[in-house]
Amino acid sequence: MAEMAVTVALRPCSGVSPAASGTNHHRRRPAAGFAGWRALAPAAHAGLRLSSPAIRVPRAASSAAVEDGSSSNTDTVPTPKVIIDQDSDPDATIVEITLGDRLGDLLDTMNALKNLGLNVVKASVCLDSTGKHIKLAITKLSTGRKIGEPELLEAVRLTIINNMIQYHPEASSQLAMGATFGPEPPTEQVDVDIATHIDIYDDGPDRSLLVVETADRPGLLVDLVKIIDDINITVQSGEFDTEGLLAKAKFHVSYRGKPLIKALQQVLANSLRYFLRRPTTEEASF
């Protein structure tokens, strides 16, 4: 599929999130006909291709600082944020990137996404009191459609975080990925037991909303989807937010086209807590 020219528009922010038009972010419904992430139907949940080969995350082409020497700024480093939104646009995956007012040219990030077989079909930059917010609408070059594979969504997340650290090394200590990609690991350690929160709500007649907040790490998005898949629960759509050292996932889920009953909610919550909790000394000794 041919690539489309991208025009970056600069405007005041009417809202930080793509869902700013609504007052209740997690209650919004996807557009009609929206397939969301590849549905994990109980009889065919291999559709997510969780066993597909690992996707290589390309490095930034340059580690140079952005204009105005922002990487050398000694002021307090704002909390980096990367939001991957599968809900608000029926045709594209929406990615929002925030780092106070320090974000510079994202041409290198767009080139890195292209190396993943993706196309940035639209980009916008808005400004508000918290800084600069960059939104990208991304599709797959091969299909012209939004991303459906969790492995590829995770590769997008890691690529953007990697490029953010390359161009803004001061962000390294503010991100869990700084230990993997950055020159400086996080200055703070997150207690996984304290940071992990799992909530499940009814979200209409045919689905539930799963909200997971925990310490961030590489591969987290893929692992969360796999755990849900292993219980034969369908992921319809969702959003995955990276905010500093933490990650927050919002998944619209169902079981055989219905919301999760209380017993199944408990099974899902227990499975996620078991996977996410910090290993104990006793377990590590065996």
Image (spheres, rainbow, N blue to C red):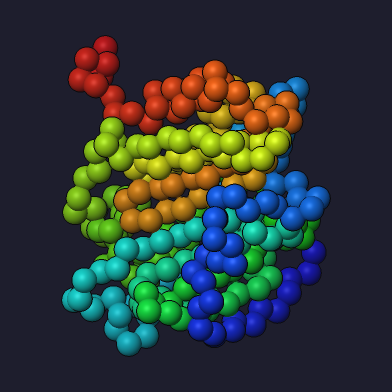
Res 204 seen here: yes
- Looking at the picture, does residue 128 appear above or below residue 76? below
Q: How many marks?
A: 0
Q: Give the residue at x 32% y 63%.
A: 79
On-image quarter of the C terminus = top left
Q: Give the residue at x 49% y 45%.
A: 249
- The residue furthest bottom is 68
Q: Position of residue 167 (x, y in %)?
A: 37, 71
Q: Position of residue 102 (x, y in %)?
A: 36, 77
Residues 222 and 40: in front is 40
- Looking at the picture, does residue 107 appear above or below residue 210? below
Q: Give the residue at x 68% y 70%.
A: 121
Q: Is residue 265 left or right of residue 193?
A: right
Q: Quadrant of residue 63?
A: bottom left
Res 57 seen here: no
Q: Give the residue at x 65% y 73%.
A: 122
Residues 137 and 253: in front is 253
Q: Position of residue 156 (x, y in %)?
A: 54, 55
Q: Quadrant of residue 113?
A: bottom right
Q: Is residue 96 left or right of residue 235?
A: left
On-image quarter of the N terminus = bottom right
Q: Quadrant of residue 119?
A: bottom right
- Looking at the picture, does residue 158 appear above or below residue 195? below
Q: Position of residue 258 (x, y in %)?
A: 70, 29
